[in-house]
Amino acid sequence: MEQTTSCVHFLAFVLLVFASSAYPFTYNVLSYGAKPDGNFESTRAFVAAWTLACGSIKSATIYIPTGRFLLRNVVFRGQCKNNAIVFRMDGTLVAPSDYKVLGSTENWLLFEHVNGVSIYGGVLDGQGTGLWTCKRVRQGLSQRSNGEFCVWLLVLVNESSASAPVVIDGCNNVKGDSVSVSASGNSPNTDGIHVQSSSSVTILNSRIGTGDDCVSVGPGTNNLCIENMACGPGHGISIGSLGKEAEEPGVQNVTVKTITLTGTQNGHAIMTDVENPIVIDQHYCPDEKNCPGLVSGVKISDVTYQDIHGTSATEVAVKFDCSPSYPCTDIRLEDVKLTYRNKPAEASCSNADGTVSGFIQPSCCL
Ligand SMILES: *[C@@H]1O[C@H](CO)[C@@H](O)[C@H](O)[C@H]1NC(C)=O
Ligand SMILES: *[C@@H]1O[C@H](CO)[C@@H](O)[C@H](O)[C@H]1NC(C)=O
């Protein structure tokens, strides 16, 4: 498998901003011995700045100026004395090029038992060569909610099937605003944001261009809302794969609003040359390998596609390919207009049941 590109632009990922007050204390990592040359290992300086920010009774900012900062695996540990620590990054965090340096730990940057950390700006460079690089940000218990707050950030793993710069796994009440993730369009299996086993995740105002899903939604996701996103290149927003495990939690209540997809494989909302604008595929078999004749045991129901316009890059713009044993039910299409080469596109349905309303083109087969 090819190596993935090494850079992830991580322009402004806001996790949980609990305080909008000014941040009176700023800890510049240079003041604690960090060097922006890409070779000097700045781990200690970052830990020193973190220790002060975490010990501050007021909100605090850790400032990372321009330059390249080499970091080994770091744990940013709480509990902290305040719940408003901001990382303001103008620079790039660089992982060791030799992944063995990270040893057996899977985490590059781990946030543990912290509450209210925001990260603005910056670039994460996984150096492309190492089999690693899992950057995890995990936030511990929040005082404002009983849920566990956490976010994992993963930086491109060269051979993982689930690599994504941002992974939200096992989290409640996570908010991402102005997330920007880019990787080259042909990077294999690089999702932008992967969400699983999480509830109440909101991703707003974001721009994602990767080789794979802009957002992929895995098992155990509830109450996910994605709004105002520009997605492409990539596969669009995907729910699944699901049903790999026999006893797997389902996905419920996913809302996708105001999305612009460009040159993506699958999509919702405004489409520009999208390969499969609307698709449910219960026969999904990515490499046509190891799943011949496989029929999904995942039940899909209650899906609404509303106000979806644009152009399809393939003739069949609407495809519901559901399994005979678990047909799709309650699929609703409302105001859909998709064309293929200036003509109405086509729709294909198998084992799918539902209703249509408003203007529908292609005429539907539900
Ligand atoms: C991943 O990177 C490691 C270290 O560079 C290398 O040994 C390994 O072969 C790579 N794996 C793949 C599938 O490219
Ligand atoms: C569905 O999720 C949204 C957040 O995206 C939430 O506001 C709403 O209450 C949820 N609906 C149900 C029925 O849980």
Image: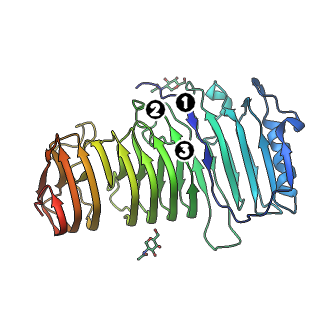
Distance (Cα) linking label 1 and label 2: 7 Å
- Name the residue located 14 percent from the left edge and 48 percent from the top edge: 345
Residue 264 disc label: none
Q: Amino acid at mark 3?
A: Ser
Front residue of 94 and 344: 344
Instruction: Give residue 98's position: percent from left, percent from top.
Output: 64, 24
Q: Specify the quarter for ligand 2.
A: bottom left
Residue highlighted by disc 1: 131
* Dots 1, 2 in contact, CB < 8 A: yes
Q: Is residue 49 left or right of residue 308?
A: right
Residue at mark 2: C-beta within 8 A of ligand 1: yes
Element type where label 1 sits in the image:
loop
Element type where label 2 sits in the image:
loop
* Dots 3, 2 in contact, CB < 8 A: no
Instruction: Give residue 32's position: percent from left, percent from top.
Output: 88, 38
Element type where label 3 sits in the image:
strand
Residue highlighted by disc 3: 180
Q: Identify the mark nearer the N-term, 3 or 2.
A: 2
Q: Identify the mark nearer the N-term, 3 or 1.
A: 1
Residue at mark 1: C-beta within 8 A of ligand 1: yes
Q: Amino acid at mark 1?
A: Leu
Q: Identify the mark nearer the N-term, 1 or 2.
A: 1
Question: Quadrant location of the C terminus?
Answer: bottom left
- Name the residue located 40 percent from the left edge and 26 percent from the top edge: 1
Residue highlighted by disc 2: 159
Quarter occupied by residue 129: top right
- Name the residue located 80 percent from the left edge and 59 percent from the top edge: 22
Q: Amino acid at mark 2?
A: Glu
- Name the residue located 44 percent from the left edge and 62 percent from the top edge: 221
